[in-house]
Image (spheres, helix red, strand yellow):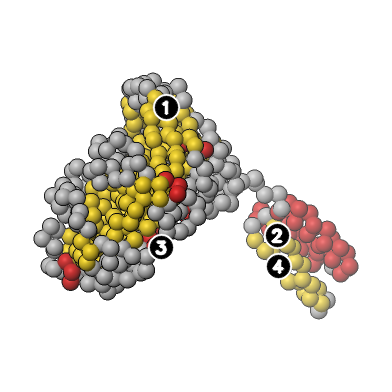
Amino acid sequence: MLIFVKVFNISNIKLIIEVGILKQHLISEILTFTLFIFRMKISIIRILSFSVFLSVILLAAGCKKKPAAAGSTFTLPTVTTNSIIVNLTSTTAQSGGVITSPADGITLNGVCYSSTNKTPTIADSKTVDTAGTNESTTVFTNYTSNLTGLTPNTIYYLRAYATNPVGTGYGAVVQFTTSPDLTSLTSVVSTFAGNSTAGYTEGIGTGASFNNPQGVAVDASNNVYVVDSYNNVIRMITPGGATSTFAGTQGLGYTDGPAATASFYAPNSATFDAQGNLYVADLGNNVIRKITPAGIVSTYAGDGSAGYLDATKATSARFNAPSGLAFDATGNLYVADRGNNMIRKITSAGVVTTLAGNKTAGLLDATGNLAYFNDPNSVVVDASGNVYVADLSNYAIRKITSAGVVTTVVGGHTQTTLVNLPSCLTIDKTGNIYIADEGGRILEFTTNNSLYVLAGGLNIAGFTNGAGNQALFNKPQGIAVDSNGVVYVADQNNNCIRTIVVTKVL
């Protein structure tokens, strides 16, 4: 189609006939008509009248556009499969996906799965879930898929899918095995010590008071040590629930020496070594402190200045708001150096190095200082020497091998609700990792890569004891597990220590 303009000169009068939008095959007819007009010398008024009439006819013809082919404005959906299976039992599981490209005209989405087809399609078993149908959306669209009627002790292959008029897009395949005998998993939450009122009171059970407890650790005798951050002290709770002060004075400071006179500044977390020494991430002082069983406090690493410096002498190194601590089997101490977005390593000889990360905040899987973290807040080490990191502002759990290779195990910016805001990790004797989600949940990440929601609700704050999601927390920060499998939680904004007893129903 084109714009056609013809200039005529009749009796020294210029006549312009403009015809809006013409079909190309009508050009010759217009030229023929023009010649006819010139030869017949028809009056100007009749020419103009006829031209207007012809323009209307041609414009109407030009406006008859062919309808767009179905799906011509769409692109094939891009989908990410949730990397882990949630609440897996013998016959049920929960998965889901994320539509990571604009959700153009999505008509179906869910997960497809099979026990025989290793690359399942929508021709196999599938769920149909809700993810919205807004054709102009440009944000990630998450959805949850609940699987039922599975066969116990069976390997399944699963991947997310999304269908629009162009076709069906698939995510990566995730493999899982149903439990041979687990019918369900139940948990009961209760208050072990403290109450909702911030304070500094010794006592039994709820008769004691804390002020924003940040961390917990358990010794070989199942005594619980609480990093009572806003009181600047370390408290101890016996198995019978009696609370006393183990080290520190209520005022903030930086003093080594006997526990009764030592001082801390907003301590954040604690962990034990194999000899029963307690190590404290003294966040406000930017150092790692050590407390012997006899109650002597000393500086183990850091020079007290916020910064970044590796060193062959631990007390010459620098940290920036150290938050999480964990030992491996050979006595190396790993530090979640939150302010530097790094994971640091302190050998038993006191040599401080950087295991992974750099000062730039981000999310990138790589090796050593090429990897990126964003507010790493806690670390644990498994029996193989792998370090797991609660990468708080990346909504993820990361894994670092002994060679410094960093990968994302669960979560990330496209799957923010899986672990949400992981504030602390702990690991039990069989290798299961427990996660405190400061958004209000306690999770368990098992050795078979399954994630269980033990208690609490996603981004729901409260103070309620009870079973499972009936229980509520308010910004849980620290987490630890004793030799009996009882989980302890430092419930920061509720100013108390909660316990979770987990039972597997077979």
**Sooner in the amino-acid sequence: mark 3 or mark 4:** 4
In the displayed image of the protein, which residue is found farthest to the front?
A: 203
SS type, badge 4: strand
Q: Quadrant of the C terminus?
A: top left
SS type, badge 2: strand
What whole-number distance in Å separates the C-alpha atoms at marks 3 and 2?
77 Å
In the displayed image of the protein, which residue is found farthest to the left?
A: 349
x and y, in percent, of residue 499 in the image: 40, 41
What whole-number distance in Å separates the C-alpha atoms at marks 3 and 4?
83 Å
Residue 5, numbered circle: 4
Q: Are marks 1 and 4 in contact (CB under 8 Å)?
A: no
**Sooner in the amino-acid sequence: mark 2 or mark 4:** 4
Residue depicted at 35% across the width and 69% down the height: 252
Instruction: Give the residue type at disc 3.
Output: Tyr
Instruction: Give the residue type at disc 4.
Output: Val
Instruction: Give the residue type at disc 1.
Output: Ser
Residue 137, relative to residue 163: is it above or below?
A: below
What is the crowding at mark 1: few (fewer than 14 residues within 10 Å), some, or many (at least 20)? some
**Sooner in the amino-acid sequence: mark 3 or mark 1:** 1
SS type, badge 3: helix
Disc 2 vs disc 4: which is toward the camera?
A: 2
Q: Label 1: which residue?
A: 184
Q: Label 2: which residue?
A: 21
Instruction: Give the residue type at disc 2.
Output: Ile
Disc 3 vs disc 4: which is toward the camera?
A: 3
x and y, in percent, of residue 403 in the image: 17, 52
Count of labels in the image: 4
Residue depicted at 71% across the width and 49% down the height: 64
Q: Is residue 394 left or right of residue 482?
A: right
